[in-house]
Amino acid sequence: MAKYKVSESALGVLWDGLKLYCTYFPKYLLYMLFPVLGQLAGLLWVFSMTYLFTKNADYLIQEIPALNSMSTFLICIMLIALPGMILWMKAFWDYLVAYGALNSMTDGAMSTGKIYDFPAHNAVVTGRAGTFILIWLLFSIFSAVAAFPLCWILGLIFFVYFVLIFQIFTFEEDVSAKGCFKRSLMLIKGNFAKTLAIMTVLFAVTYYFLEIGVSVIFDAAKITPLLLSLFEGFASTIPVDGINSMLSLAGAPQITPLDISNSIVQQIIFFIVVGFTLPFRSIVWTLWYKNLSDRNGVPAVVRSVKKGGRKKLDPEILKRAQRKDD
């Protein structure tokens, strides 16, 4: 397959990203199924099992006197919730890995014309897990500081400058965790306005408009009322009276179990939309990284190896691309 030409304009990058996402949507959907739905299933297990256990606590204590001990009761709750926590942790880790692996998949799709062998792309990240975890740690600290109201504007500015850290991690093996932030800042420097424009469009589409669209679909398919009925029982166990007392002092409107369950449903829809559109955002930022790095004379390829002053795609990945797709 001929080398994929990266668009030189911000609008072209967005359009090319959308085309790649739609072209390989089944593959991206399959890859994101467990990271997204696994987290939801794990949390659902934790809260539903804990809710059922505590709801039937009186009956269980009568049948099993040992549960009358607080320590034994808490241990049982933890053991019941443990499978869900393990499932959530595995799915959450896979979701974090996707921030690097999806960049590798995009590069493979551009180089070979198809997406193949998910473990090989995951290995691009897990092979340097220490650096990857450190990047997330540094990014989490930065996000926590930027969350303070006085830091919002400055945080937004630096968020734009640091938006390519995972692409740099994926494509430039010798760069340290701190170096990924510095390298991203250098690439975005002089291209801040275009990067901000791309980020604004991605945010509006994947965090707002698509979430509204999916909510309408859920309502039309009668999925929302079903979820509301499931969560309202759990929400009724929350001590809303105490919460409403504090809200009344602040002059805020009162809340009901239905309000809480509706909020939970909206958060689920939001998480599903954001999770399954992560590939789209990764594709766009990978294309933008390649655009900017090419301007600076730095070839961008995944798991690259030096040869004659240039780099090329890992031969093993190219070899696997020639095999029939499962």
Image (cartoon, rainbow, N blue to C red):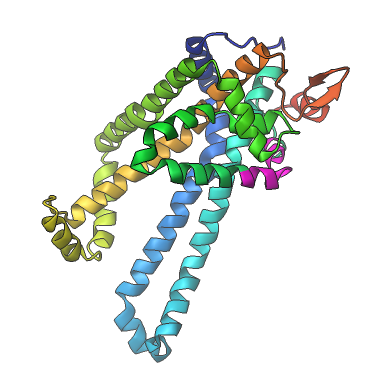
**Which residue extends farthest bottom?**
65
- Of 262 and 143, the residue lying toward us: 143
Q: Report x, y in % for residue 122.
A: 67, 39
Q: Report x, y in % for residue 174.
A: 76, 33
> Would you say residue 117 is visible in this rendering?
yes
Task: Indicate left or right for 83 with 212 as reference.
Answer: right
Whether residue 259 is situated above or below residue 298 in the rendered picture: below
| Quadrant in which the N terminus appears | top right
- Is residue 122 a member of the stretch shown in magenta? yes
Residue range highlighted in magenta: 121-134
Q: Report x, y in % for residue 129.
A: 69, 46
- Of 160 and 209, the residue lying toward us: 160
- Of 237 and 113, the residue lying toward us: 237
- Of 319 and 78, the residue lying toward us: 78
Q: Residue at x 41, y 81 (%)?
A: 73
Task: Indicate left or right for 103 with 236 as reference.
Answer: right
| Quadrant in which the C terminus appears | top right
Q: Report x, y in % for residue 294.
A: 67, 14
Whether residue 235 is situated above or below residue 298 in the rendered picture: below
Instruction: Count all numbered tags in the image, as a single digit.
Output: 0
